[in-house]
Structures are given as C-alpha cells and as structure tokens.
Image (tube, coloured by chain):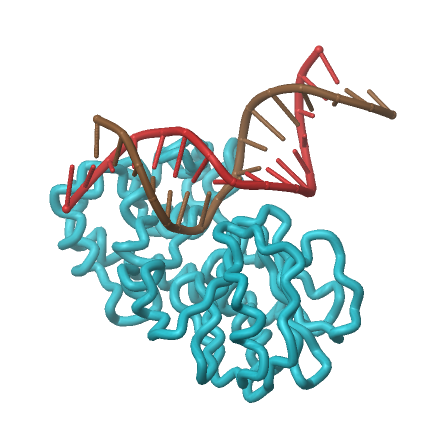
Chain colours: A cyan, B red, C brown
DNA sequence: AGTGCGGCCTGTCCGC
DNA sequence: TGCGGACAGGCCGCAC
C-alpha cells in the first residue's frame, strides 16, 4: 500500500505533467471510493489550470484557481500519466484529462482511496485540519512526541501511528522506526523516556528519508503503462521477517498483533 | 480525552 | 482444480 514515501514519489512523478496544464475533462467511471466522488467535480475542474501539486500527509493536493482536488490513494491506489486514448482497464476509476493529450489516471482496486474537492483552503478541510506535523519537518521531534505521550497508556506503536501525533508513519515504517530505536512496539507510550523519543523521532525521519531516496532512484516512469507503483525495495529489517534472525543480534523476529495491525519486532533488541 | 474496534473493499494465498 | 475463508491494510467515525 502506498505509504508516505510512495505518495511523495508519486507526487514528484506526476508533477511535471500537471503543472501549468489545463484540465480538458474529467472522466469518472466509478464514483464509489471511500467517499463518493462529488458529482460536480468534473464540471468544476474542467478548464482549470493546475497551479501546484502538493502533498500533506498521504493526501495529494491538485491546486487550481477555483479550488483544490484532494486525492488519497488508500491502500491500493496508484496514479499514472498516460496518453488520454489509452483504454481504461478494470479498476481505472478516474481520468483527469489534460490539454497535453495526457491523462492522470487513478486506479484503485480496493477503492479505499478518495477524490474530493474543496473551494476553500484545503489545509482547513475536515480531513486535513487536525493532522499532526509532517514527519520530515522540524515540527516533528522527540520533545513533541514525548510531551504528547504523557499519560498515554496504549502501545507506543499505536501512538506514533496516530495522525494527530505525526502523519505518514504507516504500519511498515512504524515497525521499522521502532526497531531502529530499540523500542518494544507494545510498550505503553507514556512510559518511555524523553531521550528514547528523541531517538525514535530520529529513526522515523531516517527510515522515511531512505525510502523516499529509494523511490527516487527506482523512480518509475509515470508515463508508462507498466509504471505501476509498488513497494520500494528498501531494506526492511523486521517488517515481514517473522521467524528470521534479527539483523542486529540474531534473535528470532516475532510477529504479533497490536491494535489490529501486524507488528514485527526483535524481542531481544527492543524493550 | 483517550482508547478500542467495526467497517469499507478486493486480490492473494492457504487448506481442504 | 475449485472454492470458501482468512488476511492484508488506512483511517474515519462511533461507542465506551
């Protein structure tokens, strides 16, 4: 599923094809995403020039003078840039056709994604207004999460995956960041020292930065039919490695369920 | 306010 | 070989 690094790589991949281009038409083949695609979106977006392609958390923002399209890829969504006449396949739900003859095509088999529209400041949109800081900015640091964590009794893994605390730490990168910080995923968030949170903020930044860099080096050609976003081949040290030896100490990596999510950790390194 | 969890979806994999 | 069922997962929104 697209996590923050994939979304950021997608943003960088599609941006050159969108920026400064006018929307010729919008084709909605299936409006049934997480929320229905607003019926008026095609008419509203048509004729608009795309002035910016931004990302906030895992939302992509296509800014125009009239308003902003808000896209989310959910778990299975992907965006590609194709010649507009390329036949749509199964699960290709939306086309944003540009004056260049290319189209931005959204595919989302599981339809957990979203395409919304707002005429106001998108950062004030209900879905975005209460989000925590971006993980790769100075607003996210150990001090902040240490403060927010006081009194929290739930597992630290749930805590750092909470979008009000920090955005963009999905299941995979939460597992990896906790491993690198040597923190046990089910430890109560409120019972972790300040210095350990400083370390966690640092490892979270590092793992996300590495993943974005990997996305850059393996950058798919977004204009190609097979330019299909997938997992980045960064080296995941614990995620998906249950039963294998820990790369640090050789103990067997364990898998458990925390907050209804698969969690991987080294029982020896992580406390 | 914090926490837990149901629900939305479909492709993939497993066991029978 | 076919088929049912479990599983995966972001994240909203509700219940406690």
- In the image, residue A186 lies at what x, y percent? 30, 35
- Residue A234 appears in view: yes
Residue A130 placement, left or right of A205:
left
Q: Is residue A187 above or below residue A90?
A: above
Residue at 17%, 41% in the rendered image? A152
Query: A267 and A104: which one is in front?
Result: A104
- In the image, residue A22 lies at what x, y percent? 59, 85
Residue at 66%, 75% in the rendered image? A97
Q: Is residue A83 above or below residue B12?
A: below
- In the image, residue A149 lies at what x, y percent? 18, 48
Residue A73 placement, left or right of A158:
right
- In the image, residue A108 lies at what x, y percent? 61, 54
Which part of the image, by quadrant, shows the C terminus of chain A? top left
User: Number of labelled discs?
Assistant: 0
Quarter of the image holding residue A82? bottom right
Query: A199 and A185: which one is in front?
Result: A185
Query: A268 and A10: which one is in front?
Result: A10
Residue at 75%, 75% in the rendered image? A83
Residue A205 placement, left or right of A11:
left
Query: A240 and A69: which one is in front?
Result: A69
Quarter of the image holding residue A122? bottom left
User: Extreme bottom residue here?
Assistant: A20
Residue at 76%, 57% in the rendered image? A89
- Residue A211 appears in view: no
């Amino acid at each position: 599923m697209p996590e923050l690094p994939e979304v950021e790589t997608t943003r960088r991949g599609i941006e050159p094809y969108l920026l400064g281009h006018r929307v010729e038409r919008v084709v909605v083949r299936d409006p049934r995403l997480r929320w229905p695609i607003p019926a008026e979106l095609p008419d509203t977006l048509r004729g608009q020039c795309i002035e910016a392609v931004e990302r906030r958390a895992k939302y992509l923002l296509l800014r125009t003078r009239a308003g902003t399209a808000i896209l989310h890829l959910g778990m299975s969504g992907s965006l590609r840039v194709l010649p507009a006449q390329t036949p749509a396949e199964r699960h290709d739900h939306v086309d944003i056709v540009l004056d260049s003859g290319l189209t931005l095509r959204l595919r989302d088999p599981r339809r957990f994604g979203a395409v919304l529209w707002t005429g106001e400041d998108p950062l004030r949109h209900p879905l975005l207004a209460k989000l925590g800081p971006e993980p790769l900015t100075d607003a996210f640091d150990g001090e902040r999460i240490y403060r927010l964590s006081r009194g929290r009794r739930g597992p630290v893994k749930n805590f750092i995956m909470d979008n009000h605390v920090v955005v963009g730490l999905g299941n995979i990168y939460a597992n990896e960041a906790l491993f690198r910080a040597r923190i046990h995923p089910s430890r109560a968030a409120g019972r972790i020292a300040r210095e350990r949170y400083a370390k966690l903020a640092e490892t979270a930044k590092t793992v996300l930065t590495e993943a974005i860099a990997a996305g850059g080096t393996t950058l798919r050609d977004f204009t190609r039919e097979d330019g299909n976003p997938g997992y980045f081949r960064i080296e995941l040290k614990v995620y998906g490695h249950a039963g294998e030896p820990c790369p640090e100490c050789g103990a067997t990596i364990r898998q458990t369920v925390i907050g209804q999510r698969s969690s991987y950790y080294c029982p020896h390194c992580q406390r």
